[in-house]
Image (cartoon, helix red, strand yellow):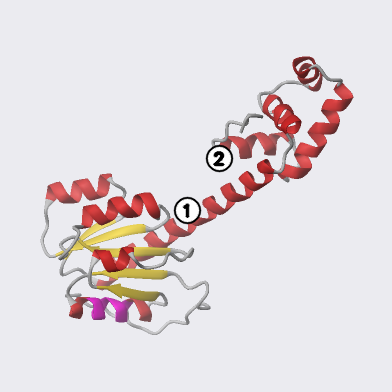
Amino acid sequence: MLSQGRDVLAIRPSPPADSQPIVFVVDDDLSMRESLAQLIECAGWRPETFGSGEDFLRHTRVRRASCLLLDYTLPDLNGLQIQQRIAAERPDMSIIFISGHGDVPITVKAMKAGAVEFLTKPFQSEVLLHTIRDAIQRSRLALQQDEHERAFEACYAALSVREREVMALVVRGLLNKQVALELGITEITVKAHRGRVMRKMGATSLAELVKRTTRFQRTVSPTD
């Protein structure tokens, strides 16, 4: 069970329901689920509990900052199997393993696969809450990155084939006259396409366009 620390259950104001981070708990021990749910709710997060891995995996995904408290030993799937599924289907969700006993090989596998922490029961409430905060922040950053990538891809999809050709050469560092020679068009036409590229991509400078393209590891090509 949880080892309570001073003031960890102090009631805190909760954010709006539609922005409140979710802490999922998957544990076949009902008393543990209830204790964790109480602690999570008092800390200002929204708890959602499940008694098995399959129940959790069937749960409809919500695009919101979240983390998962995952018991390694479950009646259906083990923790590593669930972790593999989440890595493929919900990469923004951070995982905190909890277990009734320490097992170095299992811990190493879980951490190498991206788990935030592997806690052995009983654990201090303060330690758990600190770990959850870190996991939620990681999830929030991952979601923000995903939103930026989606916005970039939407802008890129709006470019014409010629605009993509111009963009591909411009981000490689070619000057307008070099782009014109490469594509067999006039420099004036290159400038016009380049201006439309900048507007559609929402970039205020060439440096910003190159930075965004590099950031999202996007190899621009007119055949995309």
Q: Position of residue 46 (x, y in %)?
A: 40, 76
Looking at numbered disc 2 in the image, what kind of residue is underneath it? Phe
| Residue 34: image location, x then y, percent | 25, 81
Residue 179 part of the magenta-drawn span: no
Residue 146 is situated, as x and y percent measured from the top left of the image, at 52, 51
Q: Which residue is mark 1?
A: 142
Mark 1–mark 2 contact, CB under 8 Å?
no
Q: From the viewer's perspective, is residue 2 above or below residue 73? A: below
x and y percent of residue 64 in the render? 48, 65
- Label 1: few (<14), some or many (≥20) within 10 Å? some
Asked whether 116 or 174 is in front, the reply is 174
| Residue that badge 2 annotates | 216
What residue sits 37% from the left and 49% below the top? 88
Range of the magenta residues? Answer: 33-39
**Three-letter amino acid code at disc 1?**
Ala
Q: Give the mark nearest the N terminus, 1 or 2.
A: 1
Q: How many marks?
A: 2
In this picture, residue 45 sits left or right of residue 81: right
Which quadrant of the figure has residue 139?
A: bottom left
